Image (cartoon, rainbow, N blue to C red):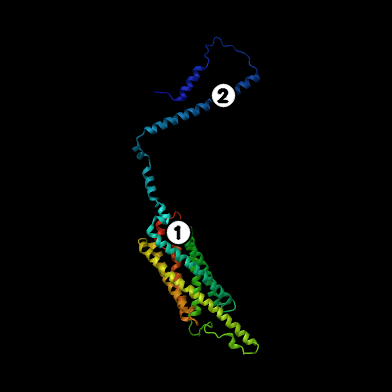
Amino acid sequence: KKKPLCWELCDAMRLQLPQSDGADDVVTEIPEGSWHMRKWRVFFLGLGSVTLLTLMCYVNNAEDMVRKADSVPVNEWEEIPGIHGIIDRAQRLEQPKRELRDLFYGGSPSEMPWLRTECVIDVVQATSYLGTAVVFLYKAIKYDGLECPDNSPVGCAISVSGFIASMFWLASYLSLAASSCAEAMNSNALCSADWMALTADFAEVANAGAGIQQNCHFRNRWFNFTGNVPGWQAFVIAGSPPTGQAVDKIKHIREARRNRNFDISQCVFDATNAASFVVRSILQLRSAARACTDPRNCAIDIMDVISSFGWISRFLSMAASDCVKRGNQKALCSADISNLVAALSNGPASGMATISDCGSPLLPLNEIMHEPTA
């Protein structure tokens, strides 16, 4: 049997040492200082030799272990203690792999028309809500009946909550567009859109509650002064300077006309949003048809569809009031009720969507099984 390398080195060093028979040994006197120097020199020499031999033995043993491991048959890994438990645990932790076709839209050519449609709707609704925010801001500053803080607290609440909701919807749709208009899915944008939509839903609930309190009481006669208003010439006698009362009426007429222009702008935004939600509801119905094999994704899509139909009803009702000269109180009441139903449906859907859109690791199945909320 071959000796280890360290043993062979030890034998070689022992043979090289000078052999003495004891006859020629001569006792010589060694100076005390030289003896101490030799003693430390011998000590360090012995320590270095032991360290070197130890390292060489370790390397030699490692090589022997590698040679033995290479000689073991491959099927003996099954005999490792606990290996079956490790394999079972790894199988339970297995997650679906994320492939490039899950990230890039080009991997699914049949989905491209739907994605581009969603991109267009996201951009259109972002623009529409930007205009709606401007209208609500004007109403909070200058619109009679909704002005803050000179008019009623309810009217002020309608204007302020409408402005806040519109700004959050603007952020939500811009985030959705950052994903749907790109070449690849943007999970961070979807997560941001969900949270912005959830915040906007709370503002919509506040807006609907204040609107129901003001617009759904029909005992008080409600009408809009921005309808048929005469020109300022009707209040000034020809050839005479305008009196103070006439000046006030002229200012009122100018303000009424400006209010009417904002009502017409809101009418355009109402019609745009209503048409956009019709298209969005079609996209959500298509997603719901595929997602109802999974209970959570199915619930998200169903609530999204309900909220979209609720907002279709809301914006059509608002258009029935904003697009006519004297407004329509019953239409505004209907719009507020529809807005409340839609916001209460969309809020839970947005909250549930954050689980998949903001989760880690991301699951591609969840991302494609529900249409983004809002």
- Which type of secondary structure does the marked residue at label 1 adopt? helix
**Does residue 86 lie above or below 140 as drawn?**
above
Quarter of the picture holding the C terminus: bottom left
Could you classify mark 2 by the number of other residues whose Cα lies within 10 Å: few (under 14), some (14-19), or many (20 or more)?
A: few
Q: Nearer the viewer, residue 269 or 40?
A: 269
- Can see residue 370? no
Q: Residue at x 40, y 55 (%)?
A: 107
Residue type, label 1: Asp
Residue type, label 2: Leu
- Locate residue 39, reporting x and y percent: 60, 22
- Locate residue 3, reporting x and y percent: 42, 23
**Does residue 9 lie above or below 140 as drawn?**
above
Q: Which circle's residue, 1 or 2, is located before the other in the chain? A: 2
Residue topped by disc 1 = 357
**Does residue 288 lie above or below 209 as drawn?**
above
- Can see residue 120? yes
Could you tell me how far apart the alpha carbons at marks 1 and 2 are, in whole angstroms? 68 Å
Circle number at residue 45? 2
- Locate residue 314, reporting x and y percent: 45, 74
Q: Is residue 27 left or right of residue 213?
A: right
Q: Which mark lies nearer to you, 1 or 2?
A: 1
Based on the displayed image, in which of its 4 quarters is residue 334 positioned?
bottom left
- Locate residue 9, reporting x and y percent: 48, 22
Q: Nearer the viewer, residue 363 or 272?
A: 272
- Which type of secondary structure does the marked residue at label 2 adopt? helix
**Does residue 145 lie above or below 75 as drawn?**
below
Q: Residue at x 42, y 59 (%)?
A: 367
Could you classify mark 1 by the number of other residues whose Cα lies within 10 Å: few (under 14), some (14-19), or many (20 or more)?
A: many
Q: Nearer the viewer, residue 147 or 266?
A: 266
Count numbered badges in the picture.
Answer: 2
